[in-house]
Image (cartoon, coloured by chain):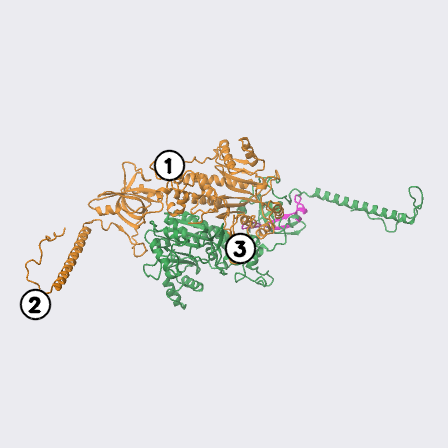
Chain colours: A green, B orange
Amino acid sequence: MTEPAPAAGASSTGDAPPPVDENGVPLTKNALKKLQKDKEKAEKKAAAAAKELAIRQQKAAADAADVSKEDYGELPLIGSKDFKPTNTPRVDLSNIADFEDKEVTFRCWVENARVQSAKLAFLNLRQGLNTVQAVVAASEKLSKQMVKFSGSVSTESTIVVTGEIKRVKEQIKSASIKDFEVHIKRLFVEVKADSPMPLQVEDAERPLPSDGVGDEEEPQQTEAGARPLVSLNVRLNNRTLDLRAKINHSIFVIKSGVCALFQEFLSQKGFTLIHTPKILGAASEGGANVFELKYFDRPAYLAQSPQFYKQMLIASRFQKVMEIGPVFRAENSNTARHLTEFTGLDLEMEFQENYHEVMGVLEDLMLFIFKELKARYKKETDLVRSAYHVDEFKLPESGKVPRIPFTEGIKMLREAGEELGDYDDLSTPQEKHLGRLVLEKYGSDFYTLDQFPLAIRPAYTFPSPADPLLSNSYDMFMRGQEICSGAQRIHDAALLTKMMIAHDPPIDPMGAGTKDYVESFKYGCPPHGGGGFGLERIVQFWLGLPNIRMCSLFPRDPNRVVP
Amino acid sequence: MTEPAPAAGASSTGDAPPPVDENGVPLTKNALKKLQKDKEKAEKKAAAAAKELAIRQQKAAADAADVSKEDYGELPLIGSKDFKPTNTPRVDLSNIADFEDKEVTFRCWVENARVQSAKLAFLNLRQGLNTVQAVVAASEKLSKQMVKFSGSVSTESTIVVTGEIKRVKEQIKSASIKDFEVHIKRLFVEVKADSPMPLQVEDAERPLPSDGVGDEEEPQQTEAGARPLVSLNVRLNNRTLDLRAKINHSIFVIKSGVCALFQEFLSQKGFTLIHTPKILGAASEGGANVFELKYFDRPAYLAQSPQFYKQMLIASRFQKVMEIGPVFRAENSNTARHLTEFTGLDLEMEFQENYHEVMGVLEDLMLFIFKELKARYKKETDLVRSAYHVDEFKLPESGKVPRIPFTEGIKMLREAGEELGDYDDLSTPQEKHLGRLVLEKYGSDFYTLDQFPLAIRPAYTFPSPADPLLSNSYDMFMRGQEICSGAQRIHDAALLTKMMIAHDPPIDPMGAGTKDYVESFKYGCPPHGGGGFGLERIVQFWLGLPNIRMCSLFPRDPNRVVP
């Protein structure tokens, strides 16, 4: 406390002699006024200085009293040298049970922080897919100042904390780690997050509106009091924040996993990973739906698939090849399952006697992927399915993938009331309908349609020996939606030439984009077949997600090329 | 043999009465002539028929005598059903020793076939990287006709053979399998190769001319009598045939291996495989050297690197990411180490305290790759090095990769007589010179230069805390050539904005290609760093190959977009 101010009535100029200047001459009224003002000014200044001093003394006293002042704060920007490395081991919270009653240090980020009282703050911390509750409690060793600071750290800031891992009596509902909490001893903000953010990460955790898109103008309300569901567009416009959601981390960990499993299985079978060019001197497969680019002083085109090249490598005796790479389609399709750029999982292999050898490899590959996704990516799969309530992905108990002739599929659809001809292509709703029928009959969400009509397949498809209107080609489906297209290819230049000319529309076998391809089959190319999967579709249908854009980090469609 | 023809003098019309018509009237001279003609015609016809019959009988007799007629021939085009699968197991010649004295069936292709005598033919057969000698010897059970057929199969035809695996007394020089040969019992041509071929596979096995390019007009002669070395251009124009060479198979098996090892190492460290977009709405990194394309009704651009996206994913809390994908550079560089499309091996990771944590991961990654290439791809490495005689790739015995400060590198070069300033960029010859000096001093073909001058690095590079003219950035080298460029990146939007504006040339931090990137660092992005490797360069310098085009299946440069 400071001294009380003097009483208002006690004037300091009361009975004093009249004031004079430095020569003893009494002052004029004006001079007197000025003097009075100066005096007041000086007094004010002195009072301010005293106040300032008092505040400083108070702060110094408080600082001296802040037993935690070395244990919290904002760190300078980490520039690798000005911040001295402490080389403190930093732990992964996935192993939290190993650290019970131990003091550990880890980096994490703040989901939210709140001051409960002057002596207590709570934080929800996240690291990877784990979230944990942290407590900052004032004590002899931990100051109220540190409690206040910790409870005020902005959401999404990156921090490094040291604390003791303690088992809790009652499970914690608000965190993924339910049996432990962190009793914080030190907390430093490494990178402070600005606020407000254009998208809340907690909103990105919630499912998309039920149509898989949503309306920005009229956000969908799910229940009274709940925040409206954020539209797909708003999420994609702020994709870097959107992707922070655990649900999105899970989707892309699974996507990474599908690639790894694809390579693991095929490597063991002796496949060589290839990288074929994405820039082509001439549009190859027909020339429709292809992006054109300026290649120095000439036009060039983006590859719609590695089809021609992977086959040319079979002609080069590579025997078994696989590729994981971008595929570009200039299709003006704005659907929930089309992208203009996606990741193709391609394979091509020679076979010995029958293209069903290739189909066998494709089916075994997919069964391996599904089995291992279940085993190795259960946590991520469960996390996504907790937001999007989709049925488990069913596989036949026999372990045998249903391999249904196309004509049989047509028959099943007709019996179920669909009207279509023997050699008609299936529409998307018909494909989905067939998916339900197959699930009913065979108990499998995954199956193959074999022997497609020749007329609806590319010119390089081998005609069927059973029926000249059919072909040695197949599609694979998950939950009634196509994920793979494949076939035996024509490995003879003369037959290929004939089929290209007879194709509707005809393809010039000696064109700039076809000549090298056709000629590669003149010198003893072995019989071969293969297929191409859409990676994003496998992930979408495995998880039962409503929109393929959710399975592309930065999706591209006719209306979106940013971010 | 047929009966001998009657003697020429014996006329069948000798002493006969004059010919008459059906009414007994003697014939006119004209009628007589006509009759004579008709008779001659009929006789000719009869003779032809007799000859035809004789040929048929002869052939039937020959066929009946050909004990092998079911054991060789040309198969019809394999259409999967008209050729009945035999389901005969077909063996891999890599395991040939397991089949000693056994009869096996395998597919292979013909390197060359030659008839030695009426009773003996030799074939050189190839399967993958293996070549084996095969013998077709006439016997009671194997006809001379089969010997003749087998010895005449055209080079590069795909065949299926059945034969007995026999150990030989003297090692076979002309094949990779030296201790065994195949005694053929059945031989069928599955796919016949046309001839002549525009490029001989045996020519593709031989090294490139010594400049790594060669001259088509004046092919390089290596020694008297030897075939001239085929130029790079001729090889690349006929790439599907060129790639059949064992040396090329080896290069691409190694390339596939580098990818697999990259992923194996980083997966174990918890990296997520990502796929970032290759089509960008705006040119990002400065806008130079970028390919423009037509994206529906607007322009778009091909990604020069995944740099911005991999960093945005660190801002999205992905912690550790890797990508293997095409990278496009519209640089008009026609050198032995530049491509306009190549495969980038990228990684980006958050670090805890110092960017040298990232460098440590990069160095360990490369040491792992080198070690495993030696162990798992020895056969392929040796095969390539047998054509291109290059020194073994040296690694430091200590296992510690030399990490040389840029300023120290400058000093070493100056002491070796190079003239350059403290903050100058190194020219390619200077880099190679430094490589030789480092090899001499540290005994390593692999090393890192650290702390590059800030002015010669991208705007997002973190300035060095030690010297404002330097930066927390590094390059990695193999045999004195750059394979990787990396750095600590600026993870703070304000500093990044400042550095972009100050950059030469300045970059607009709010531009269409930069805004989303810069803003992603506003919400608590952790400190991070990473690097990008050129996959083809790793393969090129590992093997010491003279031209990077040899490490791309279908290389792209300013003058080449086909095949």
Reading the image, the residue beneath label 2 is B24
Q: Which residues are magenta?
A: A121-148
Question: Do tags 3 and 2 sit on the same chain?
Answer: yes
Query: Is residue B554 shown in magenta?
Result: no
Letter of the chain that mark 2 sits on in the rendering: B
| Mark 3 nearby-residue class (10 Å; few <14, some 14–19, many ≥20) | some
Q: Earlier in the sequence, mark 1 or mark 3?
A: 1
On screen, A362 above or below B248?
below
Whether residue B392 is visible to the viewer of this picture, yes or no, is yes
3 and 2 marks in contact (CB < 8 Å): no
Camera-nearest label, 3 or 2:
2
Camera-nearest label, 1 or 3:
1
Q: Amino acid at mark 2?
A: Gly
Question: Do tags 1 and 3 sit on the same chain?
Answer: yes
Question: Do tags 1 and 2 sit on the same chain?
Answer: yes
Letter of the chain that mark 1 sits on in the rendering: B
Reading the image, the residue beneath label 1 is B222
Distance between the Cα atoms at labels 1 and 2?
Answer: 90 Å
Q: Amino acid at mark 1?
A: Thr
